[in-house]
Amino acid sequence: MKKINFRKICIVALSMIMLCMTACGEKKEDKKETVKPDIMQVRSLSNLATLECYYHNVSKSVKSAGFGPAHIGEADRKFWFEYSGKVKLGIDMSLVTMDFSEEDKKVVVHMPKAKIISIDPVFDESTNVIVSSDNALPIIGIVDKSAGVNDIKSEDVAKAFNNSEASIRKQIENDSSLLLSAEERAEKLIKNYFDQLGNINGETYDIVFETIEE
């Protein structure tokens, strides 16, 4: 009867156990790594964080009569025109920074206040300008027919337009509710980013926003 070599069996069994332990160790090492918060990804939300508003404006202006002999008989003339435009409000995301605590999963986002990013009016040569009737006084003995006429020129319309746009910008800058909406939109997008990151990592992040001055 052939003798069984228990020593060899023990060595083989021990080798199998070590192999299993190594395999288990490799499975643990294959565990998905935690994705850390990335400030560049937060800043990339810049375009999505933009709030767009449309407006319609009626610009009214008066061109006063001129002074001097060349303007004898001129009268003030009123003129007005309508146009539309688009305003973009948002956060300068390039200034956004954050502090992240790995221990308690707290994120402090430092963010500037919302501001006007751009104003894009639709105003060109096709814009209809309405001018009041000429109330110039008739000047006897004046041969030049242009005398006494206070014409509305392109530069007068351009000046009125610039004044209107400056007024609109000021109104928006003073509209705290509109700017607050832009800030809330940016905060919502940033929170959504951390919610998605938390789903990936199986974590819950505590988000705190702090306002910084530019």
Image: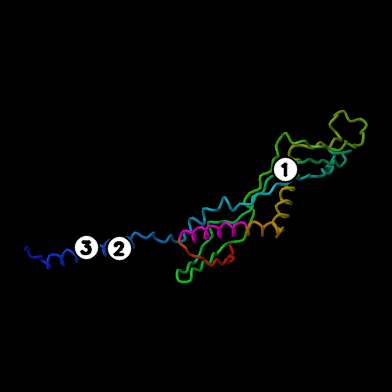
| Sequence-earlier tag: 1 or 2 | 2
Question: Which mark, residue 84?
Answer: 1
Q: Residues within 10 Å of mark 2 (few under 14, many from 20)?
A: few
Q: Secondary structure at mark 2?
A: helix
| Left or right, 184 with reference to 37 | right
| Sequence-earlier tag: 2 or 3 | 3
Is 186 covered by the magenta stretch?
yes
Q: CA distance from mark 3 to mark 1?
A: 79 Å
| Sequence-earlier tag: 3 or 1 | 3
Q: Residues within 10 Å of mark 3 (few under 14, many from 20)?
A: few
- Closer mark to the observer between disc 2 and disc 3: 3
Question: Which mark, residue 16?
Answer: 3
| Left or right, 156 with reference to 110 | right
Residue occupying image coordinates x 88% and y 40%: 75
Is 9 covered by the magenta stretch?
no
* Quadrant location of the C terminus in the rendered image: bottom right
Type of secondary structure dominating the magenta stretch: helix
**Which residue is labeled 2 in the image?**
24
Total marks shown come to: 3
Residue occupying image coordinates x 86% and y 42%: 76
* Image: magenta residue range: 185-200
Q: Position of residue 29 (x, y in %)?
A: 33, 62
| Residue type, label 1 | Ser
Question: Which mark, residue 3?
Answer: none
Nearest the eye: 21 or 137: 21
| Left or right, 121 with reference to 76 | left
| Residue type, label 3 | Met
